[in-house]
Image (spheres, rainbow, N blue to C red):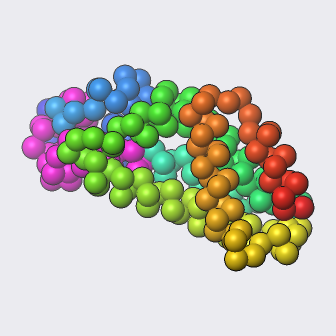
Amino acid sequence: MRTAVISREEILEASRRMLREKGWSAIHMRSVAAQCGVAVGSLYNYFSSKTELVAATVESVWEELFHMPEDLPEEERFCCCVQWLYDSMREGNRRYPGFLTLHAMGFTTGEGKVEGRRMMERIQSRLRDSLCRVLREDVQVNQPVFDSRLTPEGFVELVFSMLLSALLRGEDSCEPLLAVIHRVLY
């Protein structure tokens, strides 16, 4: 057994590695402790349950995947951001096979349902907020397209839903979505 103090980040890195290599079913307090080389009790210093560990692992995967680039081109900036988000999600699904599908289904029942949904909403809310910011800052957007029936927030919600849907269907590209965005906004 390891005698050195372990950090929360080391535990989450071990959990992400197990998720990549063996999938969701491999993540248990005992298996993660073994992966870290520590006693199971050490994990309880950071996570009160398997559900909390899994939720934190999922959140750390989302954070690993999504760091909004600052160097998006000025031309059709919102479209570029949507393409980047789609590519990041596809890469995440490649790196963590089935992550989006399993994540979407993983918190629909059981003990972690409420916390899992809360955590997922927090992460997705940050992504939608970033998309709204990029949309508002895109100087090429035809601003009169928005009114009380179609707000920037509502448009971003539609785009985000379509992105997730395309990814869950396994689409190779988001070109149809980008074409619609282009026709509506520019």
Which residue is pictured at 77% across the width and 59% down the height?
78
Q: Is residue 12 left or right of residue 104?
A: left
- Residue 106 image point, x, y percent: 35, 38
Where on the picture, by quarter, is residue 43? top left
- Residue 162 image point, x, y percent: 65, 46
Magenta stretch: dominant secondary structure: helix
- 52 over 76 or under it: above or below: above
- 105 over 55 or under it: above or below: above
Question: Would residue 186 be seen by someone viewing this image from the given angle?
Answer: yes
Magenta segment range?
Answer: 31-60
Residue closer to the observer: 115 or 30: 115
- Residue 95 image point, x, y percent: 53, 31
- 20 over 183 or under it: above or below: above
Locate the N terminus by quadrant. Answer: top left
Where on the picture, by quarter, is residue 16? top left
Where on the picture, by quarter, is residue 13? top left
Residue closer to the observer: 100 or 87: 100
- Residue 64 image point, x, y percent: 50, 47
Which residue is pictured at 61% across the width and 36% down the height?
167
